[in-house]
Image: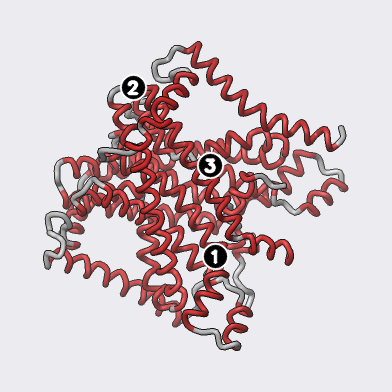
Amino acid sequence: MSSRATNRLKIAAEIAVPLAILGGWQLWTVHAHSQFFPRLSTILVTFRKMWLFSQFGEHVVPSLERIGLGFGIAVLAGVLLGIPLFLSLCGYLLAMPHIEYWRAIPPPALLPISVVLLHSIGNTQKISFIAFFCLFPVLLNTIDGVRSIDPTLVDTARSYGVRGLARIRRIVLPAALPQIAAGMRNSLSLAVIMMVLSEYFSSTSGVGYVLLISKNTFQLAPMWAAILLIGLLGYVLNVLFILAERRVLAWHRGWRAATA
Amino acid sequence: MPGLGDAATATTVESPADQGVERAGPGIARVGQIGAVLLSVAAALAVWELVSRTGLIAERDLPSMSSSFRELWSLVQTTSFWGAFAQTVRGWALGLAVATALAVPIGILLGSSDFAARALRVPIEFLRPIPSAALIPLLFLTLGTTLRSEVFLAAFGAFWPLLVQTMYGVRDVDPLAIDTARSFGVGRFERLYRIKLPSAVPYIATGVRISSAVSLILAFTAELFMGIPGLGQKVNFAQAYGLNDQLYAYALATGFLGVAIHLVSSAAERRALRWHPSQRTAAA
């Protein structure tokens, strides 16, 4: 078989297999008549009714707001904390045991504590919870990224007299940016998970709340629609981030391709 | 041209070469490091005690460090604590085992066959970022508050990182080694067994370490949200009854379990990779 034909076959498979899975799901649910697995078509119709766009403002917007703010705070704090931690070995040693402990604890263990401590099941508690756990990937990647800067770069900058803030802004940050971006991407998918968990635990609005309420009231189609929405949310945010990253780090890819 | 999905996974794959970069210096430096760590932990505990004692945060909301640890000490002497502890560990272990049993063979298949990888790329890229937490209500209604739900959730979450690591590990094999083996007439299965698998082991080991953390998180999550017996359920009860001392004690215990599992899986990773260049200390 020519390589062109093989390639065409691969593309065909890439399109056919997902369609076959969806078709299989619809066929199975039509025949199974299970109350827990409504027909795919029913789920899609419910999805359109709920999320496009009658409940969008009421539940999706608050969730997105929490993800956005929690993620934003985490990125800012992670980068701001990560750079000084690199600059002083002592600070790094002092911070490491705490980072290791909080990173190893299963996040939901702190959900009840966050409610008790902050006296809130509103945005303050949700956003702080999301921000706290999204902090670690950004922080650790910032530390790593800054530590692995090419020493020649640092020395050259020093001999040209680039110091202080200018050194951080023009040498350290750009060099660490690709790795910071990798940390940010992990944080973003974490933010979606934390949003769902915190809303599912206790809340009055949001996608996680809809998930909880529809489960409690045995409304299976809305529950599946919420699951589908959360899946799409995770997927779309990831794709958007990759597109943004490609734009911002275009220089990095070009540089890597040239040196490789 | 690499697809969007490929670029997406490429950066999350942890190259084993990144591991073991940090090495403690010998002698005095090492003692200084341990000293700094102890000092830092002691300082944090002291701050906790002070914040609670001085009423900066009401003692009702944040029990002091000493009373939380006293509570933990009295819990440790009960069998109900160790029962819950063992149940969480069981959920973690079974979840990780199921995930490994599925992800490694499938990862090897997808890593060695370009056709299979392309055919399943879209479903995998779609399923992977789905937060496992979204499945909790579905599991609650279908499998109920059973160990099966807990293991399913833990295995589902732990499956993806391990799958991706295995896939990239098999793909990352040195082409020269494969070509050499082929020209010596080494068969397809022997190539897989003798060359591809050993060269993928570092990636798989890293994957197991990541997945083991995920598995613990989801086992605990299942217990907290579905009321399956274990540490998560204890935390939930403590909060529901307003037993804040117990709440903090159980959260501390969960954190220690997390740290222990992290240490064990990192040690296992290093052990499995003793022969690998990334783990070699400088000969000097």
Report whether B27 appears left or right of B203: left
Q: Please, what secondary structure does the residue beneath circle 2 have? A: loop
Q: Which residue is mark 1?
A: A177
> What chain does mark 2 sit on?
A
Q: Are marks 1 and 3 in contact (CB under 8 Å)?
A: no
Q: Which residue is mark 3?
A: B160
Query: What residue do we see at 62% from left, 63% from top?
Result: B278
Which of marks 1 and 2 precedes in the sequence? 1
Give coordinates of residue B79: x percent, y percent.
23, 43
Q: Are marks 2 and 1 in contact (CB under 8 Å)?
A: no
Depth check: give the residue in front, A194 or A72.
A72
Calculate the distance from the C-alpha at mark 2 to the C-alpha at mark 1: 45 Å
Give coordinates of residue A135: x percent, y percent.
40, 59
Label 1 crowd bin: few (<14), some (14–19), many (20+), radius 10 Å: many
Q: Are marks 2 and 3 in contact (CB under 8 Å)?
A: no
Query: What residue do we see at 60% from left, 87% from top?
Result: A160
Q: Please, what secondary structure does the residue beneath circle 1 have? A: helix
Q: Which residue is mark 2?
A: A219
Disc sitting over residue A47 in the figure: none
Q: Please, what secondary structure does the residue beneath circle 3 have? A: helix
On the question of residue A179 being in view, the answer is: yes
Placement of A4 over or under A122, stated as above or below: above
Label 2 crowd bin: few (<14), some (14–19), many (20+), radius 10 Å: some
Mark 1 residue type: Leu
Q: Are marks 1 and 3 on the same chain?
A: no
Nearer to us: label 2 or label 3: 2
Query: What residue do we see at 38% from left, 27% from top?
Result: A223
Counting the numbered discs, the total is 3
Calculate the distance from the C-alpha at mark 1 to the C-alpha at mark 3: 26 Å
Query: What residue do we see at 43% from left, 60% from top?
Result: A75
